[in-house]
Amino acid sequence: MAKKYVNFRVGGTPQKETEDYTVWTNDLLKRIIASKTVIQPGKSTTGHKLINSDVTYIITNGRGTMEIVEYMNDEDGHGSNPSYGVQHKDSYDLSTGDVILVESGDYCRVINDSDHDQLTYIRIFDREGWRQD
């Protein structure tokens, strides 16, 4: 049976706020998390390694760059341990409307390349990989 929620939007009080970027998160669903990040002009996220979670990024405003580092494979297949070394490192140009899929175990950082406009994206990921810091 469907439920009605009072707050079904990603918004309200930010989960994380710095000079460089702000993150809003909605954790009402049992299996997935949705968050919105706004990066200020010329700034970037601090970057992090995805743990136990594949992530979909949807660019809703602005332009920038995404840096991805894929670690060498370990016994479990796709690399998740930086001590095995870097297998592949790349960067991708981002613009409004882009959808980027990032695999669990990869390191990811988003940079706003604009001097004037904010870069905004939505992230959808499974609850198991949610870092609440």
Image: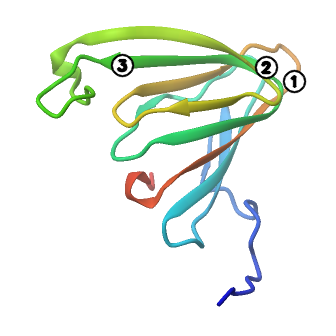
Helix or strand or loop: what does disc 3 sit on?
A: strand
Question: Is residue 6 toward the left or the right of residue 65 in the image?
Answer: right
Callout 1 secondary element: loop
Q: Nearer the viewer, mark 2 or mark 1?
A: 2
Q: Position of residue 44 (x, y in %)?
A: 62, 24
**Residue linked to disc 3:** 70
For marks 1 and 3, give the CA distance. Answer: 29 Å
Quadrant in the picture for residue 88: top left
Whole-angstrom CA distance, mark 2 to mark 1, is 8 Å
C-beta proximity under 8 Å, tags 3 and 2: no
Q: Depth-wise, is mark 1 or mark 3 nearer the camera? A: 3
Q: Earlier in the sequence, mark 2 or mark 1?
A: 2
Q: Position of residue 66 (x, y in %)?
A: 59, 19
70 in relation to 37, above or below: above
Q: Quick one: label 3, few (<14), some, or many (20+) residues within 10 Å?
A: many
Q: Where 11 sits versus 55, above or below?
A: below
Task: Tell me residue 61's x, y (percent).
Answer: 84, 32
Closer-to-camera residue (126/24): 126
The kind of residue on which mark 3 rests is: Glu
Hey, which residue is sitting farthest bottom in the picture? 1
* Relative image position of residue 42 (x, y in whole percent): 73, 16
Circles 2 and 1 in contact, beta carbons < 8 Å = yes
Q: Nearer the viewer, mark 3 or mark 2?
A: 3
Q: Which residue corresponds to mark 1?
A: 117
Report the residue that reaches farthest toward the right.
116
Residue at position x 21%, y 12% in the image: 85
Above or below residue 34? Residue 97 is above
Residue type (three-letter) at the residue carrying disc 1: Asp
- State which quarter of the image contains the N terminus: bottom right
Q: Which sits in the foreground, 107 or 31?
A: 31
